[in-house]
Amino acid sequence: MQSALTLAQLRVFLAIAEHGSFSEAALQLDLHQSTVSYTLAEMERILGGSVFRRGRQGALLTPLGERLLPHARAALAAIDAMHQEAALERGSLSGVIRVATLRSAGVHLLPAIIHDLRREAPDLHVRVVHSPSGSLEDPLHAGQADVSLLNLPVATSLLTWPLLRDEYLAVFARGEAPARLGWEDFAARELLRCNEECWRIIRPHLEAHGVHLGAADQVREDAVILSMIGHGLGMSVMPRLSLDPLPAGLELRSLPDPLWRTLAVATLPNRASTPLVKTFVASARRVASRLAGSLPAQEEVGPRG
């Protein structure tokens, strides 16, 4: 009779795949590295094939490992969902929900969501995950995040719930903003690009209005962009939430043709019905509804030509 795979083996397999390292997987799982190695060896014995290649670059998935990875993620997600449903039946939803987020949403939206969750489900905890690629969709598909707070539209097959609309504004050093901003004003200034998630929305809008972008410098950190602008090194276009509070020495203008983004919460279709995700989405929508009432309406910022 063929031996069955265990949950421990699947967790070890996923941890190594995520970190590319036996030692990092051991740290995450709070296990000795020898235990991780033995557990994986047992899994490979049962499967009759290797799932990782070990080398100088760490542990890399074999073709078999690549094919098994989505099945392992789905199996563990199903087990976790069963535990969540049972906890919900007992009236004590608990666990950890992993969130990938835009910086501005992480600053202005996520803390309020966590506060709301502590009232609704005090045993539910939030873990913020980082996306090395900058994409907030990648962590969902890689099984590293349960939900993402991101900009619409999304490029892949995700379920999304719109939360807030947020205006993109031109940012200048104080005294350098034109009295009436026109598209021609962009040609006379160095344009500092925001992060890729932000830039993918701004760039088509600028190009559609004849703004020649050239080789604009890209800076991933909002604080660095604002500091560079304050030192007279250029201007930028950024969403309003990223500019709150606005540092001294800067001023804002609405674009000649206004541009808005929609912030949303997103998840994989097969995760949407799990208690943790449903609870987080409900909380995010409540918080966004309250926050929308405190955001400035669609008024113009500064004169516009």
Image: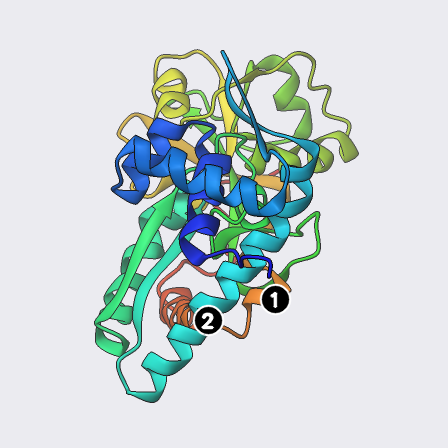
Distance from label 2 to label 1 (Cα)?
11 Å
Total number of numbered discs in the rendering:
2
The kind of residue tagged 1 is Asn
Give the labeled residue for mark 1.
Answer: 270
Give the secondary structure at mark 2: helix
Looking at the image, which residue sits at the far front? 1
For mark 2, does the 10 Å Cα neighbourhood hold few (<14), some (14 to 19), or many (20 or more) residues? some
Residue at 37% in and 82% down:
86
Residue kind at label 2, given as amino acid type = Ala
**Relative height, residue 174 to residue 31 (above, below):** above
Residue 178 visible in the snapshot:
no
In primary-sequence order, the first of circles 2 and 1 is 2
Using a 10 Å C-alpha cutoff, classify the residue at mark 1 as few (fewer than 14 neighbours), some (14 to 19) or many (20 or more).
few
Establish if 278 lies above or below 20: below
Determine which quarter of the picture holds residue 64: top right
8 vs 235, nearest the viewer:
8
- Indicate the position of residue 29 as horizontal and vertical percent values: 31, 44
Task: Say which residue appears at 61% left-offset and 46% top-offset.
Answer: 47
Q: Do the residues under discs 2 and 1 have CB atoms within 8 angstroms?
A: no
Q: Compared with residue 301, is residue 248 higher up or lower down, i.e. above or below?
A: above
Q: Position of residue 286 (x, y in %)?
A: 39, 74
Callout in the foreground (2, 1): 2
Q: Secondary structure at mark 1?
A: helix
Tell me if 133 is positioned left or right of 67 in this view.
Answer: left
Residue 5: horizontal and vertical position, in percent?
52, 55
- Tell me: 149 left or right of 121: right
User: Relative to 193, is 229 on the left or the right?
Assistant: left
Nearest the viewer among 20 and 263 is: 20
Q: Which mark is residue 81?
A: 2
